[in-house]
């Protein structure tokens, strides 16, 4: 009963869809390219054999970039605006705050300054600090501008949104600069007055989720998800064209194994992930959480050869992944900690079993992600095929009636966030969903 493995190795359905997505160009949330990508994904799921493939639109805060600039001394430094930065120009002293750790903000007066921070954290620090956490530490401490310096070399200014769910547009102008430009600014202009300006059009827009399904018509369902949007500066191949290509490849594989599915499997490609998990939040707030057996969210797959599954303390999600790895004699890394970023989190926050499927990497941070360099030639069809085999087996196993995945109490999730030192950052960014 392994013929399905050969079929996945021979399939080019997922890779062809990845090429289709990256060739669209701009897939920024709310733009025509995102809509085109969603329609193409809907059609690809239908062609794969999934039923009831459809789009579900929702309103979002749109943002379209204009020109941006950093002027320092008699120089103009290359930069890009961070999405959802306000349209604004400020003149103030530059303060290079290095990594921008919380204690750095406590120890340094940044009021009425333009703060520059790196995109990584030091090896000795015990947790990852998201871009938005650093941004809102700057806001809370009175900064008037924010410069986000990439730690990856290669003249690659990083992008990534600011803003909160309640206030989608950020409070101070925010720009990304390359590692090299950041080094130049720190060396020549730290403490000196500089000018940062962002031109952006803020407007109402519409995004959409893509949905389709396979398997028996059970009330309970397993969600296989990704996000279809990407940042406007690149192809968005790794983040997250590859994740959506994986969803299509899994639909194609599971259509041939539909009789093996004991629980309905729903495929969802969310919109507007890059601007605050908007599509998945809209879905989750309307869904019957008790009817969702598990969420398997691909965001960062195919980047490297070996799968990594962040299981958020749901023991069954880890146990089944280990069983699949043993059965096929192929490694799958599992991480039991919480990861409050990407679309699974809209469900996990309420105790719904969910995992974040990505790749094990030796590199810190996003690598080429969120830069001009997130392009398709850095990915390999072989990796997509190998990971699709493992994830097909994973979905079939989780959909079995005799596999029970216990939910977690939201209070336990909140306690884990506190214990893993993630709560402070979520509270700063407005992402803390709990009363206590």
Image (cartoon, rainbow, N blue to C red):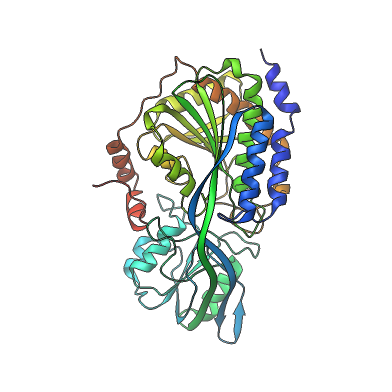
Q: Is residue 302 visible?
A: no
Q: Is residue 167 above or below residue 257?
A: below
Q: Position of residue 350 (x, y in %)?
A: 35, 38
Q: Position of residue 113 (x, y in %)?
A: 41, 77
When asked about the image quadrant of residue 313, the answer is top left
Q: Is residue 430 above or below residue 182?
A: above
Q: Is residue 313 above or below residue 239?
A: above
Q: Position of residue 307 (x, y in %)?
A: 57, 35
Q: Residue furthest bottom?
A: 74
When asked about the image quadrant of residue 151, the answer is bottom right
Q: Is residue 354 visible?
A: yes
| Residue at screen point 76% across, 27% down | 10
When asked about the image quadrant of residue 386, the answer is top right
Q: How many marks?
A: 0
**Front one among 185 and 70:** 70
| Residue at screen point 41% across, 35% down | 287
**Front one among 411 and 308:** 411
Q: Position of residue 85 (x, y in %)?
A: 48, 67
Instruction: Please identify the quadrant where the N terminus is shown.
Output: top right
């Amino acid at each position: 009963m392994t013929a399905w493995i050969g079929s996945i190795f021979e399939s080019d359905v997922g890779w062809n869809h990845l090429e289709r997505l990256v060739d669209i160009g701009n897939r920024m949330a709310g733009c025509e390219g995102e809509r085109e990508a969603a329609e193409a994904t809907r059609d690809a799921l239908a062609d794969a054999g999934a039923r009831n493939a459809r789009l579900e639109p929702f309103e979002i805060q749109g943002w379209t970039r204009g020109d941006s600039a950093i002027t320092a001394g008699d120089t103009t430094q290359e930069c890009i605006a961070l999405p959802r930065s306000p349209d604004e120009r400020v003149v103030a002293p530059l303060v290079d705050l290095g990594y921008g750790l919380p204690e750095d903000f406590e120890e340094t007066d940044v009021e009425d300054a333009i703060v520059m921070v790196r995109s990584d954290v030091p090896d000795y620090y015990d947790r990852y600090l998201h871009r938005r956490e650093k941004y809102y530490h700057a806001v809370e401490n009175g900064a008037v501008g924010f410069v986000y310096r990439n730690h990856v070399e290669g003249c690659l200014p990083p992008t990534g949104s600011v803003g909160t769910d309640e206030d989608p547009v950020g409070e101070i102008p925010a720009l990304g600069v390359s590692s090299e430009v950041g080094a130049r600014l720190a060396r020549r202009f730290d403490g000196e007055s500089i000018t940062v300006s962002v031109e952006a059009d803020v407007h109402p827009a519409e995004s959409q989720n893509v949905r389709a399904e396979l398997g028996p018509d059970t009330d309970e369902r397993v969600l296989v998800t990704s996000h279809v949007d990407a940042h406007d500066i690149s192809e968005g191949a790794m983040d997250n064209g590859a994740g959506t290509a994986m969803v299509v490849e899994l639909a194609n594989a599971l259509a041939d194994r539909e009789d093996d599915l004991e629980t309905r499997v729903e495929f969802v490609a969310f919109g507007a992930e890059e601007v605050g998990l908007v599509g998945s939040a809209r879905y989750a707030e309307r869904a019957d959480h008790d009817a969702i057996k598990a969420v398997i969210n691909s965001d960062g797959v195919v980047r490297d050869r070996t799968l990594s599954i962040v299981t958020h303390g749901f023991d069954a999600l880890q146990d089944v992944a280990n069983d699949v790895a043993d059965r096929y004699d192929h490694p799958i890394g599992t991480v039991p900690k919480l990861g409050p970023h990407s679309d699974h989190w809209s469900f996990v926050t309420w105790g719904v079993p969910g995992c974040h499927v990505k790749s094990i990497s030796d590199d810190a941070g996003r690598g080429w992600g969120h830069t001009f360099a997130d392009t398709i030639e850095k990915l390999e069809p072989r990796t997509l095929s190998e990971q699709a085999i493992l994830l097909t087996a994973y979905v079939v196993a989780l959909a079995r009636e005799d596999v029970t995945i216990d939910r977690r109490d939201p209070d336990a999730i909140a306690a884990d966030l506190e214990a893993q030192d993630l709560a402070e950052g979520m509270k700063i960014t407005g992402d803390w969903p709990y009363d206590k």
